[in-house]
Image (cartoon, rainbow, N blue to C red):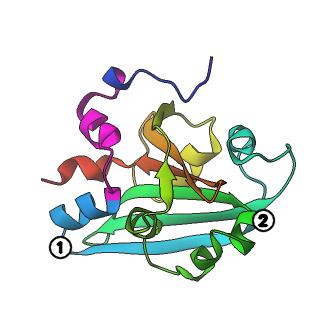
Amino acid sequence: MNPWHSPLWQAGPLRDWLADHGSLTRRLQARCPGFAVQRLAQGIARPQADECAELGLAPGRVAVVREVLLLCAGKPVVFAHSAVALEGLRGPWVGLSKLGNQSLGAALFADPMVVRHPLEYRRLDARHPLYRAAAAHLTETPRFLWARRSRFERAGSPILVTEVFLPEVLCLP
């Protein structure tokens, strides 16, 4: 069974955030006047083991991995992780290397050539590297965090975007 097929009903109050098919960036900007993106890391690295197949990469291959925090009034509300094959960054995704502290989501949703595949969901705990990466930015760490991911394609080249929802997102209107 694919661990990214967790039943969404188990997400409780986060279900609405997870299931929204629109731009997360746009939704956050509408609810938070102090919205910002803080780039944590971007560079060549090994993607998560469960990302390789989604990216068409053999296990052990490297990709360009980017991690950011989405902030509302300085408080982290989402930890975002994206991965794209090196070939994609030299081709259809060439502009992504220049995003800096700009939102990847905004760039993806603004491009009519980008196709989004269905969302997948997963409850992460301390055993998962993305939980640990996201929890490092929290003062109190919950037992688990909910995440969603989606594969986007442009000219047949995939990029995988995972968004880990932090507890503070539930404080937004």
- Give the image quarter of residue 42: bottom right
Q: Give the residue displayed 59% in from the left and 78% down from the top.
A: 95
- In the rendered view, does 111 fall on the left or right side of 131? left
Number of other residues with Cα within 10 Å of mark 1, as a class: few under 14, some 14 to 19, many 20 or more: few
- In the rendered view, does 107 fall on the left or right side of 41? left
Q: Based on the picture, tell me whether residue 11 belongs to the magenta stretch.
A: yes
Kind of residue sitting beneath label 1: Pro
Of labels 2 and 1, earlier in sequence is: 1
- Tell whether label 1 touches label 2 (CB within 8 Å): no
Magenta region, mostly helix, strand or loop? helix
- x, y percent for residue 28: 26, 61
Q: Based on the picture, tell me whether residue 170 belongs to the magenta stretch.
A: no
Secondary structure type for disc 1 = loop
Nearest to the eye among marks 2 and 1: give it: 2
Q: Give the residue displayed 62% in from the left and 69% down from the top.
A: 93
- x, y percent for residue 121: 46, 33
Q: How many marks?
A: 2
Residue 150 lies, with reference to residue 80, above or below; the image says above
Secondary structure type for disc 2 = helix
Q: CA distance from mark 2 to mark 1?
A: 37 Å
The stretch of residues the image draws in magenta is 10-24
- x, y percent for residue 62: 82, 58
Residue 115 got which mark? none
- Give the image quarter of residue 15: top left
Q: Give the residue displayed 19% in from the left and 51% down from the top.
A: 171
Residue 99 lies, with reference to residue 30, above or below; the image says below
Which residue matches tag 1? 33
Which residue matches tag 2? 87
Kind of residue sitting beneath label 2: Glu
